[in-house]
Amino acid sequence: MKSIRQYLLLSLCAIFGLAFFVSFLIGYYSTAEEVEELYDAQLVEDARFIEGFLNQRSNKLDWRHINAALANADKIQLTNGEEYSAEGHAYERKMAIQVWDSEGNLLLSTPSAPAYALSPLQQGFFRKRDGEYSWFIYTHRIPANKHWLIVAERSDVREELIEKIVISLLSGNIMAIVMIIVLIGVVIKRGLAPLTRLSNAIKLRNLDHLQPVKLQEQVPEELTTVIKALNHLFDRLGEGIERERRFLADAAHELRTPLTVLKLQLQVAAQAQDNLQMRQGIENSLLGVDRSTHVVEQLLTLARLEPEKGTVQREPFDIVGLGQEVIASIFPLALTKQQNLALQCVQATHLYLGNRILLSILLRNLLDNAINYTPPHGDIELAIDIASNGIRLNVLDTGCGVPEEDIPRLMERFYRHEQSADTRGSGLGLSIVQKIIELHDGRLTIENRQTGGLAVCVYLPTH
């Protein structure tokens, strides 16, 4: 389809043309039928009128004078295509009257009638071809004198009337169709004008200009839906672009210092005078690489979570079994610091409707933070409390806790309080946790334990 305007114009013109053609055919045949009925009735009326004069015995009629009077029709002089004058009408020559007696003798005839009977001498309507014309005939028997009266008219009388009616209809309809086509073109142009303005407004949009489209005039309901969808798309594009820019900015922000330090450490290792100093420089470099890798992984995880916009695929899974799997996978980290890592839950299994992968990331980040901020030989516990309206995931540690004034800032990106300077974290873990909790319509609370350490509680409602 090249153009909606062209398609609508051609389609509507074709529909109107077809409707006009069907209407014309119906009108033509209906007109022809009505004209024939009208003229047939006129023939009968003429026959009954003439019968009134002839309804007496033939010996009382002066057939010679009547024929002489009828012969005057041939004496009418018409010029310049005139159809009538004061003396008569040209159509008289297209009408014929005959009177025959019961023995087959012609008693009366108009000049336009042939010398033979135009129809069989029997009551009724007839049609007969005579030369280049056809005759419509009505034959009537006069009971008083048993004569046969034949009243006829040529077919071109009716055809001319039908032709004039058809021409009149055609001329009027053609003018109407031309006006309709012009009006359709104007209406289509006005109807598609908002679409043209919308197209021009979209052309002005680029990656730095994705503001919602707003047309000044009233917009049709059908186009309003399109504009809403476009604005929603622009919002998503803007969020995606902003997300990419933020990711690049975050990555540059977090990797600039580690890469600089890594470069210095490698330079120190390259200039080392002995193997011990070189080994220490390489080990420090490896630690820097590990931290940079961790930062990139956390940034990628957060970038993948942000597009969800509150929608998450849910499926039933065993939340207790998931806790066991996460603890088993992260246990080697706790083992390096000789920490105790335990799972506490009353039930052995419990099905929860949620996203298993995201909740696995949530538990891993919470336990990873607890391991990082808990000193060697400390205790870390994952307690799963199950209720009818939801579940609680509690991560408890015996670390040094967090100053009360710093707790509200723990969910900020890259925020790390002073006591975490020596840990390998990136400051993104709790941002990821918070996002996953939002996707599950839950809530997060963080507080210091009275016995020391930190308690992180995640509440997830049952769906």
Image (cartoon, helix red, strand yellow):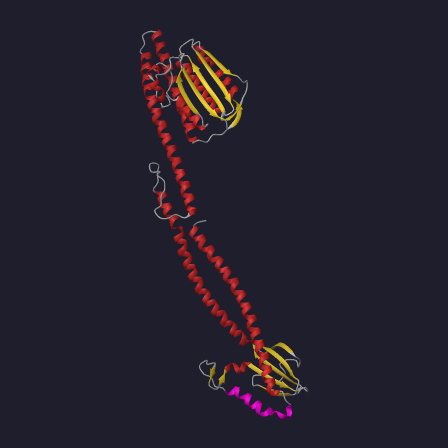
Q: Name the one closer to the observer, 433 or 34.
A: 433
**Residue drawn at (47%, 67%) of the image:** 170
How many circles with numbers are drawn on the protein?
A: 0
Q: Main secondary structure of the magenta part?
A: helix
Question: Is 142 covered by the magenta stretch?
Answer: no
Question: Is 66 covered by the magenta stretch?
Answer: yes
**What residue occupies the far right of the structure in this picture?**
103
Look at the image and tell me whether residue 447 can be seen: yes
x and y percent of residue 146 in the render? 67, 86
x and y percent of residue 179 in the render? 42, 62
**Residue drawn at (34%, 8%) of the image:** 277
The segment highlighted magenta reads 57-75
49 w.r.t. 17: above or below: below
Look at the image and tell me whether residue 414 can be seen: no
x and y percent of residue 92 in the render? 53, 83
183 w.r.t. 229: above or below: below
Q: Is residue 224 left or right of residue 346?
A: left
Q: Name the one closer to the observer, 186 or 358.
A: 358
447 w.r.t. 178: above or below: above
Image quadrant assignment for residue 117:
bottom right
**Residue drawn at (51%, 62%) of the image:** 21
Image quadrant assignment for residue 294:
top left
x and y percent of residue 201 in the render? 35, 44
**Residue drawn at (56%, 83%) of the image:** 112
280 w.r.t. 170: above or below: above
Q: Is residue 175 left or right of residue 142?
A: left
